[in-house]
Image (tube, helix red, strand yellow):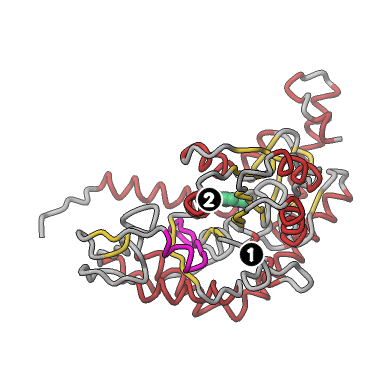
Amino acid sequence: MFPRLVDKNTSVILKRLQQHLAKSTKLSIGYPANLDFDYALLLPFFQYYLNNVGDPFVEGNFALHSKEFERQSIKWFAQLYELEEYWGYLTSGGTEGNLYGIFLGRELNPDAILYSSNDTHYSVAKAARLLKIPHVVICSQFNGEINYEHLEYELSQRKHQSAIININLGTTMKGAVDNIERIIEIVEKVGVRYYIHCDGALGGMLIPFIRGAPKISFRDYPIGSISVSGHKFIGSPITYGIVLTRQPYVNKIETSVEYIGSQDTTILGSRSGIAALLLWYAIQTRSQHFRKEVASCLENARYLRDRLQEKNYHPLLNDFSITVVFDKPEIELCRKWQLATEENFAHVVVMQHISTQKIDLFIQNLLVNKEIENEKFLTGNRKTMCVINCV
Ligand SMILES: *Cc1c(COP(=O)(O)O)cnc(C)c1O
């Protein structure tokens, strides 16, 4: 082994980062990531090189991988979404899953136009740009759901071209869930050839566990693919995602590559083998309780919504969502609690690590801040103009 030098300076720098992360984790409530996880049992695997390069269902010549764990994880998701002849892989995140789904839709329908709502994650527009697919943006309703009438109108304007439709199963900002059944009715009525990709970055792991929620089912609906983020609901120190599609679709486009002794079916080449272990371990240890985890997040999200309602912050909490949107508070408060903001709104995503105690603390902070700001406003401080939006 070559020598390595861990000098004092290096350890001090690392220690400082660790302290910063520990502190920031406590106040992180604005982004959709579950920070309540423990993968300590997997630490020994950091001693090994783990690369799941290429197709997870093809064992190449290269042996340092965890593809068996990846396949078992993919199988679990296939069962969750009622998909029998499945194929999929662990991506680098929700973004790559969206890129893959839209790529597959385009390979199957080379003349396609992509349709997605205005509230869609920016990765979808990026995919259209990368793949040079014409892209039509559909209006959203106030709650973030797609405007179905507008979708029907735009589809009927381009009846002779195939459509790739991105369906949001939980939008980024407002957590809105587009209605799969209604969208399918529309495309069937208009009579276009279509491919449906579902963006379930966060909601893909919530909806199946909520009683009364719409089904995400490849058996009941002609869904082409779904993308889910691994680091959002499941939680992970390493970012990754899951993409799932119908196996017969993939057969139509794959190409084999001799060098890796595998099929080049994935968007990226080398892929994290640790991600497969993380996901497999989370499924092994928590999948029986996912329903409970979701129920608790929903309950706490309602709790936060009610508190914000009392304080006149005009909260919005969509059905089947744990994202609470409200009037954007002062910038310092947004920074302190790492709130994601858009226009006049901010949101809290009530993940597993956000307890009612933490919510109470946040609300307290919000009120104190508002009082200070109101005072400044009354004394004519121009910096506080945004308070107008809050009251
Ligand atoms: C977070 C998110 C993505 C992107 O996922 P990454 O894992 O960050 O790449 C895509 N779509 C939606 C709706 C999201 O919320």
Identify which residue, 262 or 370, lies in the foreground: 262
Q: Is residue 94 left or right of residue 65?
A: right
Q: Is residue 63 left or right of residue 367?
A: left
Q: Which residue is mark 2?
A: 109
Residue 329 vs 51, above or below: the answer is: above
The kind of residue tagged 2 is: Asn
Instruction: Tell me residue 115's x, y (percent).
Output: 64, 44
Instruction: Tell me residue 170's x, y (percent).
Output: 68, 55
- Image quadrant of residue 334? top right
Q: Is residue 82 visible?
A: yes
The kind of residue tagged 1 is: Pro
Mark 1 Cβ and ligand 1 under 8 Å apart: no
Specify the segment rendered in magenta: 236-252
Task: Name the residue at 25% across, 69% down.
Answer: 60
Q: Which mark is residue 146?
A: none
Q: Dots 1 and 2: beta carbons under 8 Å? A: no
Give the position of the N terminus as an image quadrant.
bottom left
Identify which residue, 336 or 160, lies in the foreground: 160
Instruction: Tell me residue 208's x, y (percent).
Output: 67, 71
Q: Which mark is residue 222?
A: 1
| SS at mark 1 in the image | loop
Q: Is residue 320 left or right of residue 281?
A: right
Neighbour class for label 1 at 10 Å: few (<14), some, many (≥20)? Answer: some
Instruction: Tell me residue 369's x, y (percent).
Output: 76, 38
Identify which residue, 373 or 165, lies in the foreground: 165
Real-space CA distance between mark 1 and mark 2, rounded to the nearest whole angstrom: 15 Å
Q: Is residue 143 magenta?
A: no
Residue 332 vs 245, above or below: the answer is: above
Which mark is first along the chain, 2 or 1? Answer: 2
Q: Is residue 251 magenta?
A: yes
Q: Is residue 118 left or right of residue 31?
A: right
